[in-house]
Amino acid sequence: QRVTQPEKLLSVFKGAPVELKCNYSYSGSPELFWYVQYSRQRLQLLLRHISRESIKGFTADLNKGETSFHLKKPFAQEEDSAMYYCAGGTSYGKLTFGQGTILTVHP
Amino acid sequence: SAVISQKPSRDICQRGTSLTIQCQVDSQVTMMFWYRQQPGQSLTLIATANQGSEATYESGFVIDKFPISRPNLTFSTLTVSNMSPEDSSIYLCSVEGGREAFFGQGTRLTVV
């Protein structure tokens, strides 16, 4: 099992669209998640693919053909600045994490 | 949801010594997970701890180096044994519940 986030750092300006890339390599059908860690806070769930939800304006579409689960937001806000991890697993607790992407949103 | 408390939050230890990290959950859970995050690296699962049975270790991690206890459904400990500077990392406790994982605040370990 492998989860890859190709960008270690991503900088955008407030109001610009943002996309954090994630690709996975898994046997079977994994559960896929985006976790976020804001400054001085613990790691927390942002969203999961199975729910097909939008949280804080973020969405993530699972593309099985491209084995991707990119995270998108049309208009970035300064409070979105954080470390974002893509993760996959065959259970909700036993996860394989990507390397993480530090998103910085400039005013 | 689950609230996880980890102790200590950070420590500086001498090489060759051992450190035990405690993880307390505010609800009963079947499985608890221990992760390591080395500097500049991602989170890597060390082991899964079930109450009443031995922990299951991931490839590259062994019980002699990272012994784990799970005496009840709300508590677990991870010991980092015979430490070397390469063990300097953040160690995280995690549980699953409600179709997501919950994490402790982590223990930042520095080995000198």
Image (tube, coloured by chain):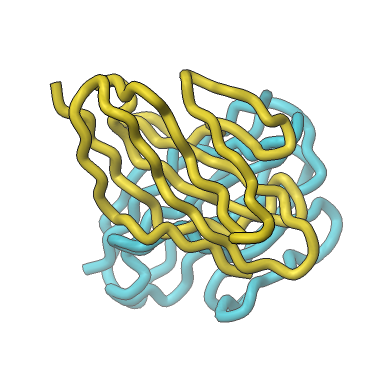
Chain colours: A yellow, B cyan
Residue at image coords 64%, 46%: A62
Front residue of A31/B70: it is A31
Residue at image coords 35%, 41%: A83
Front residue of B43/B95: it is B43
**Image quadrant occupied by the C terminus of chain B:** bottom left
Residue lying furthest right: B52
Q: Position of residue A104 (x, y in %)?
A: 23, 35
Q: Position of residue B43 (x, y in %)?
A: 47, 57
Front residue of B94/B71: it is B94
* Quarter-of-image position of residue B111: bottom left
Q: Is residue A16 visible?
A: yes
Residue at image coords 57%, 68%: A2
Q: Is residue B52 left or right of residue A75?
A: right
Q: Is residue A88 left or right of residue B35?
A: right
Q: Position of residue B13 (x, y in %)?
A: 29, 62
* Quarter-of-image position of residue A61: top right
Front residue of B68/A50: it is A50
From this view, report whether residue B6 is shown above or below residue B70: above
Q: How many marks?
A: 0
Q: Is residue B78 visible?
A: no
From this view, report whether residue B112 is shown above or below residue B102: below
Q: Position of residue B64 (x, y in %)?
A: 59, 79
From this view, report whether residue A14 is shown above or below residue A62: above
**Image quadrant occupied by the N terminus of chain B:** top right
Residue lying furthest front: A65
Residue at image coords 67%, 39%: A49
Q: Is residue B9 left or right of residue A92?
A: left
